[in-house]
Amino acid sequence: MTDAPERADVRPDPRTPAPRTPVHADAAPARRPHGLRAVLAAAPSGPSGWIALGALPAALALWLLALPNARLSRMGDLGLLQALPPLWFAAPVLLTVGFVAVLRSPVVRHRWAGAYVLALILVVHGTPGLLYPTLRYAWAWKHVAIIDAVLRHGGAVPGAGKLDVYNQWPGFFEFHALVLRATGLDSVLGYASWYPVITNVLLLGPLLLLYRSFTADRRLVWGGIWLYYATAWVGQDYFSPQALAYLLHLTVIALVVHRLAARRRLTRAGAGARAGGSVRPAGSASPAGPSGARALGTVLDGSSRAGWRAAPFALLLVLIAAIVSSHQLTPVMLAVSLLLLALGRRNRRTVLPVLAAVVGLTVLWDATVARPFVSANLSGLIAALGSPDHNAVAGLARLGEAPFGQILASWADRGLTAAVLLLALAGALRHRWVRRVGLLPLLVAPVAVLLANAYDGEMLFRAYLFALPAAAFLAAALLWGNRAGTPAEDALPPGTPPRPATRPGGPLRTGVCAVLLLGLLGGTLFGYYSKEAMNYFTPQEVAAVRYVAETPAGSRIISLTANEPGGELNYDTHDRLVLGDAAGEDLRHLAAAPGDALRGALATPNAAGGPTYLILTRAQVLDCELTGLLPASAVQGLAAAAAAEPTLRRVYANQDAVVYQYTDSDAGGGAAAPAGGSTP
């Protein structure tokens, strides 16, 4: 025997007993730290570690200290930004600085990066839920009213009128009705206010799965996730079918991309075994790009396992069915994304079965349950295909003049959107490997849908939201990616400490990233908070709307706009007329002669034979002001005309709302108003 180390290609005799490790009396088994000690042990090291360790609790403390000093009465044309004290803004700044410090560390820890992302979600999306005594946003209230009607009728709502479309896509509403029945809750209002926080936290799962299918580099994964949440200004995370459908859509995409990446790794391993058992060393870079980038276009060997296993594919079918039954647009977005992914020949065995399921279930649903809506709107859908320029800008024109704050917020939104897309394009041009991992199809697919339909003027914002997961990762690759590859974590032997796939940048690069992230987050705050003056409803407004909802069945409710907290309550027994929903010449007549327009609406007979009510609220006025729907003179003229109209009797009033009853006997307005009205 010699003391020389054993050669790697010489195997020991299996009959030779393994050497025993000497045991010392003073040796003790290593114990893993727990509690606070474990948190400190996982913290980044060096100066960056101290910043990361201190910035997170300091930001949360400042946020909690600032909330009691918020004054909702100060909200104006910049929304919640005007109501928050200066101390509040220190919280997102500290979170950004601390997160950059986490990424600056040689080894990025999941625990700390995830904590900063969760804190960002809580600060941005949890602030309205803590400050507002009522549910925000009129569309969220509409969905609450629909669920209430579904519960009362045990399913489809008869006599739904214009809201019958929700009978044809009932998945979201039936799900929450089931939740209420199972939990015994009276209403979804108990948790709907926290739906933005819940939705964004749940999105973290598919984002992690998607990004870790592209790379094992923690710096790129968490950088992309932070950029996603820091630039998601559209605000489609409220209590709505599209929020649920978007979450499920991203989950399906993540599962498909993850399957493609897994097949690539299996194919590579099988090819290495057939080549004579040689396996690429754990530290070598991938020939397809930087190590950690899992290209989806690798040639699949004929002997490799193709397709899906039964359980994962069954899960996909459930998710797709939930999407198809809940929302009209999301299945189209999903189908286009999968179609572009399937253009790569090597991806088709995985993508085409999922694409066939999406198309098949969508066509089946539209031809059966949703047939009334599809038949009535088919000609309009076909006509929209020939107007891509109109689809891209629909919904932006208004008759009135928006205030300066809204113009500023609008330009901030556009600037933020352009900045994110430019960063994504630069990332795709700088790093060749990102163009081979399925990111570009996910980035381009929403643009194709944008050109196909206007979707009531919302398609431009929806397209940005659906493109954001890919755009955020591409931007992260630009900011934190390196051209040279380094070992990926999943290629290392078990038990090996995680190594960085990219090097932390120098002070200059770190400073530039911090400033850029702060600018992007500032733009998101403008877009997300700037309309909160009209999205927020006071308890007085809620009380007035509930008073109207309790009027006799067959009543007709007239309002200036639909921006009310629950104006659709009992929509199956009440008729509703929204003056601001008029178009063309009728809307111009309302702007020029609001009194005449009001008297014309009141004189229109109520087909149901019940009384007619007019409700005007603070949020309706702000809706006209902030969106530019009607000039201020028209809003003031209509309020004055209502107060002076002899056929209108005020039956309810408080500081934020007023309700009138039309008393003309020929129109059936002689019925008594419900009890409980109050006057200031």
Image: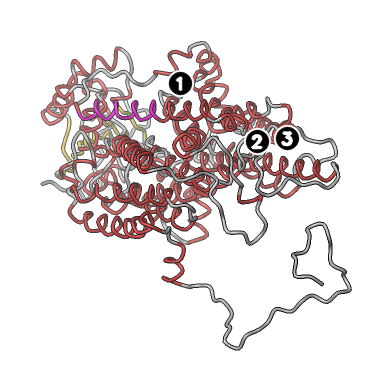
Magenta stretch, overall SS: helix
Judging by the rendered image, the residue that carries numbered circle 3 is 353
Tell me if residue 38 comes above or below residue 257 in the rendering. below
**As drawn, is 65 to the left or to the right of 414?**
left
Q: Which x, y percent locates residue 65?
A: 22, 58
Q: Does the image show residue 558?
A: yes
Q: Secondary structure at mark 1?
A: loop
Q: Quadrant of residue 272?
A: top right
Residue at 78% across, 58% down: 8
The amino acid on which the numbered mark 1 sits, given as a three-letter code, is Ala
Give the number of the disc on residue 454: 1
Q: Secondary structure at mark 2?
A: loop
- CA distance for labels 3 and 1: 29 Å
Q: Quadrant of residue 566?
A: top left
The mark that comes first in sequence, 3 or 1, is 3
Decide whether residue 308 is among the magenta residues.
no
Tell me if residue 390 comes above or below residue 666 in the rendering. above
Decide whether residue 418 is among the magenta residues.
yes
Judging by the rendered image, the residue that carries numbered circle 2 is 295
Q: Nearer the viewer, mark 2 or mark 1?
A: 2
The mark that comes first in sequence, 3 or 2, is 2
Tell me if residue 127 comes above or below residue 424 in the rendering. below
Tell me if residue 91 comes above or below residue 646 in the rendering. below
Q: Which x, y percent locates residue 161?
A: 45, 31
Residue at 52% across, 13% down: 383
Figure label count: 3
- Mark 3 touching mark 2, by CB under 8 A? no
The amino acid on which the numbered mark 2 sits, given as a three-letter code, is Ala
**As drawn, is 313 to the left or to the right of 175?**
right
Magenta stretch? 405-419
